[in-house]
Image (cartoon, rainbow, N blue to C red):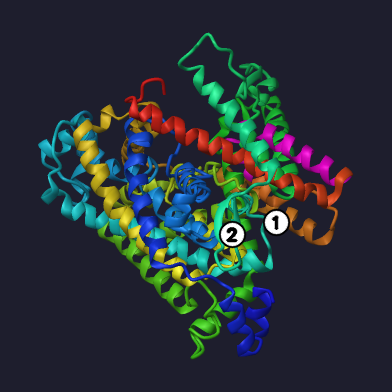
Amino acid sequence: MSLARVAHDQPPEHVQLAERSARSFPRGRVLLLSLVFLALLVYGGFYTDIVYSTAEDFNGGVPSPGPFAVLFLLALLSTWRPAARLLGLSRRELLSIFVIVLAGAPMVSYGVLAYMLPHAIFLQYAASVHPEWAGAFLKLIPTWFSPTEHSAVEGFFLGNASVPWPLWVAPLAAWCSFLLALVIASSCLALIIQRQWITHERLSFPLAQIPLELIAEAGTEADRRGQLTAVRVFWLGFTISFCIKFWNRLTNFLPSLPGIPLGPVALMAQQTTGPMAAFGEMDLVLWPWLIAVAYLIPKELSFSCWVFWFLRIGVAFIAIAAGAPPRSPEGWLGDTAFPAFAFQGFGAILALTAWAGWRARRHLQRAVRIAFSRRSGADDEDEPLPYRWSLIAFALSYGWMVYFCCMIGARIWVGMGLIALILMFYLMWTWLRAETGLGLLLFPLFIDDMWDAMGNGIFRSQEIIAIMSVRWAYFPGAGSTAQLVSGNVLEGMKIADSARIRTRPLIYGMAVALVVSLVLGVYVTLTGIYRYGFHNLRAADSSWLSSQINWGAGHMFAAISTPSQLDPRGLAGIGAGAAIAIALGLLRLRFWWWPLHPVGFLAAHSWGMQWFYTPFFIGWLGKALVTRYGGLRLYRQTVPLAVGLVSGDLINGVIWALVLAARGGVGG
């Protein structure tokens, strides 16, 4: 009997007991192994991601290499008899370890702790370089934001110092509590709505298919062990992807070896004049893993992503022909001038949030009804958390974040609006990831840019400080911000549902992992930064980390000293994007054959699609041909090939990241 039937029809108690007895309860060693590997990932992520920058999101990213490598390693050990006798992990236990590690790992990545901790203390450091900044906002910053002593600030950025822990007690308590509240609130939203998306709407969850296809069961009925799949087509895909990427990384050490161009390879240089500038630099991208993701999602989604990208180019062409400055489609980022692509994307987020809420209205009504009834804990005992707990945890977390903004000096409505917008972005990117796997896309519009267009002159200086000081929470998306945790939680629930793992003990394990990774991550990150110096970290130098921290402080000064006024063009862009997204949704409801999906419209208006449209076209074309001439049977037979392509890329990336970090980043 399906979970949907259990949830809505409430069959007899003996049927519910049978359903629950079929699900595995992860044992204590699962949590112990999870925490051991999580601790290793905390250290590994800090050195590969932040110190030497030898990996692209070792613990973060979508999909996440570090946690996947843990799953692959444990499954590989299970094929070795001595290790198999020692561990004896079943498929459910292996997947449980993966899900628990997946929840905690993102804490130590350059988009979470390595971005949050420097964000506040940088204001003290920058004030010595920009005296005008000090006069504009430094006196308004609360004393608990960060250490203010010169030696503590200088040691953070220059290194060769020990952590002044007494000076960090109050800042860590404030910022870590905000981060924890943000993760809890967004995860509770995902847990409340997960039944709707997993069971009722049956979203595709392409990334959840990877661990599910990777792990098979072996052994006798009394001793079922998990191990790597033996499906040959999986290993064909794994070998192709692994060998190509391994060879290309090898060419960094042996330049005489010819590389295999996977892109971006420029097919057409960007034009600087005339409407042809709308095409930007036309690149060919042949990343096997992304082609595989596009193959795994529904055809109408992959089709919509690349079609809407070319429609965006067409609109940019028209705008330039009508007099707009020549630039590529992604060049409109944050601009309110027609066609205001980023604002259209934000409008699509608003519309799709309302659309998702409307589609889930019966489920949400039932959840609220159960939460406030005497049957709470009984009618929702198969949920990851009782609805009452989820709602209380969400309300407390949301309230604390609003109060945090008020402590900075914001009015309550500003704090409520800011936190609501952040959570809306998180929820929509969780949905986007579940539907398309595209959690790696940047948010189309950042909250500070949106409020600049709406007129930041309505805000007090302290409110500008509040908005900009939590910028680490809403920039840039792309699997690099804390929204990754709620996406991982929802993906974990999908894996548990498919593998028939009891979700409640799994959630408790994920909560423990999250707290452990936060505490250990703060220690490792702070001690490491004071040792090396923030300015000496490869991640600060070679990624957006340092430039965005500096830009955020400059933006804060500009918004306080020269506030903006309402720009009606931004509102028009938001309205247009919302109207288009709603129209696309209605057309899909009215006509079964309508091929364009509103999620594809949102994806095309996010930065990154200028590279991703090629893999999505190839994945769509491949799936269309396979299903047309081979039917669903051939498609199911080729799914392991796609999973193998993704798996080979992830494992290759982890191996090279660790090797290069061990070499001190040489060759990275």
Work out whether residue 410 can be spotted: no
Quick one: quadrant of the N terminus? Answer: bottom right
For marks 2 and 1, give the CA distance: 51 Å
Q: Is residue 386 toward the left or the right of residue 232 in the image? A: left
Q: Nearer the viewer, mark 2 or mark 1?
A: 2
Helix, strand or loop for disc 2? loop
Circle on res. 582? 1
Q: Which residues are magenta?
A: 603-628
Q: Name the residue: 51% across, 17% down.
A: 251
Tell me which amino acid carries mark 2.
Gly
What is the x, y in percent for residue 385? 47, 73
Q: Name the residue: 48% across, 57% down.
A: 99
Work out whether residue 105 can be spotted: yes
What is the x, y in percent for residue 295? 71, 43
**509 part of magenta stretch:** no
Front residue of 124 and 136: 124
Quick one: quadrant of the C terminus? Answer: top left
Q: Residues within 10 Å of mark 1 (few under 14, many from 20)?
A: many
Front residue of 85 and 464: 85
**First in residue order: circle 2 vs circle 1:** 2
Q: Is residue 407 toward the left or the right of residue 275 in the image? A: left
